[in-house]
Image: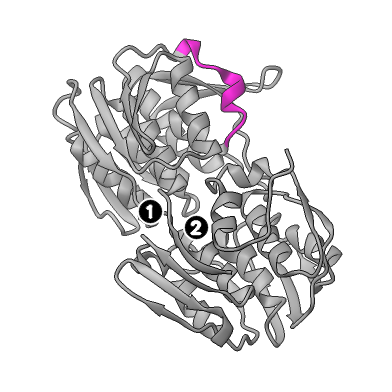
Amino acid sequence: MKGEVSVRGFKNSATPIIAATILNKGKTVLNNIPRIGDVLTMLDILKSCGSKQRWLDEYSIEIDNSDLSPGSIDQALLKKIRSSVLLVGPMLARFKKFKLATPGGCHIGARPLDTHLEAFKEMGVKIDFDEKRGLYNLVLNGIKENRAVLKEISVTATENLLMFGADNNLEIRLAATEPHVADLCRFLEKLGVGISGAGTNFLTIKKRGSSAAKKISHKIINDPIEAGTFAVLAAATKSDILIKGCDPEFLDAPIMKLKDFGVSFDVGNDFIRVNGKASVLKAAKIQTLPYPGFPTDLQAPFGVLATQAKGSSLIFDIMYEGRLKYINELKKMGADAVILDPHRAIITGPTVLEGAEIESLDLRAGATLVIAALLAKGKSVIGNIEQIDRGYEKLDERLAKLGADIKRIN
C-alpha cells in the first residue's frame, strides 16, 4: 500500500460535545463531525426527545435543542452505546432529572457506572435503579456538595461532571486530562462556563451567569487514535503512508512506542509519514496508562505490530480485562501469543500470519484485525464489522484508495 490518508474528527470528542449541546437552548453548529456509528446514534438519541438537526455539509451539523423533552427519549437507543452515559450531566443541569437505560458499547471488560453515580450522589443527586426495566432514575433536588473526588481517573465521569458544572459551581479532583476532555472544556467556555485547570487532574468550574440561548459554533479535534491506527497499519504492512490532519502533540506516547518498535517515520506539525519498507521491527513493551501515557485504545493495533517484530513483546493493559480477547483471533491466524492473565500477554515474532475467518469483538479490536488481515497470506473474512463502523468512517473505502485489497461483503 502507498499514498496518503486524512484523519477524521474524533469520536471521543464528538459524543460528549453533542451531549453538551443539551445545555444550549439556542442553535449550535458543530464542525468536523465524523459520520460514524456512535456519533450518529448519539444524534438520533437527541432527536428522539425533540432535538432539531440540519446537516450543513458532509461534516457540519446545526443542532437546535431549544425544545427538548427528556421523558420521550428512546431508551432502546441509549442501550446501544456506552457514550449515552454522557447525557446524565447535561440533563441534570438543565432539567434536574433524567432516566437512563444501562448503556451499551464495546465488550472490553467491566465498566461499571460507579464512578459517575457515586460522584453524582455526593453532589446531592438521588439515584434509584429499576432492575426489572434496567433504568436508572436520577433526580437533583439541590446541590449538597461542590467537590467531587473521583474514585478513578475516568474520562467519561470527568466529562459528565464538567457538563453538570455548567449550572453548578464544582471542583473535580482526579480529573482525566485527555485531549477530548480539554476540547469539551473549550466548548463549555463558549457557553459561558468558567473552567480553570483544563489538561490537569484538578478542575474548577464556575457556573455560567446565564442559561439564555446562544448561537455558537465549535470544531471537533481530529482523531489521534485513528492517526495512531494508520501509523501501525503502515508499519505492519511495510507500506509508505502519509497521515494528514493529525496533531502529533496528542500522540507523544504512541510516537515513542513506534520508535521502540523500530518504525521509520517523520513527524510534522500536522502529519506523520511512515516508511514501512525502511522499518526494522523489534519487540517492545506495551503498557497502557491514562493520558498522557500510552492509550488503551491503541494497545490492540500495537499488539498486531508485535506479531511482525523480532523478539517477545509484553503487553500490559491496566485498564480493561477484556482488551486482550483479540489475541485469540490473531492466534487463529497463526500468531505466537500467550494470554498470561486478563491484563497481560506475550506476543513473539516475527510470524507469518495466514488468512482466516475472524470476529471483530470490539471497536479497536476490529481495526486491529483489519491490519492483521492485510498483512496475512491469503484471504480473511472479518465478522461483526459494525463494531468497526462505530469508530472508523468508511475504513474499507479509505484503505482501498491506498491500494488495499478489501471489500465489504454486505
Nearer to the camera, 275 or 78: 275
Q: Position of residue 314 (x, y in %)?
A: 68, 78
Structural crowding at the residue carrying mark 1, measured as other residues with C-alpha within 10 Å and reported as few (<14), some (14–19) or many (≥20): many
Residue depicted at x 19% and y 38% = 190
In this view, the residue in front, 395 or 104, is 395
Given the current orientation, which residue lies at the most extreme left position? 209
Q: Residues within 10 Å of mark 2 (few under 14, many from 20)?
A: many
- Which residue is depicted at the point 56% across and 38% down? 82
In this rendering, the answer to whether 105 lies above or below 373 is above
Q: Which residue is mark 2?
A: 226
Quadrant in which the N terminus appears: bottom right
- Is 289 colored magenta in this rendering? no
* Whether residue 117 can be seen here: no
Q: Disc 1 designates what residue? A: 222
* Frontmost residue, 114 versus 308: 308
Residue 127: image x %, image y %? 51, 24
- Which quarter of the picture shows residue 18? top left
Q: Is residue 281 visible?
A: yes
**SS class, disc 2:** helix
Q: Is residue 72 above or below residue 180?
A: above
The kind of residue on which mark 2 rests is: Glu
First to last magenta residue range: 71-81
| Dot 1: element | loop
CB within 8 Å, label 1 to label 2: yes
Q: CA distance from mark 1 to mark 2?
A: 9 Å
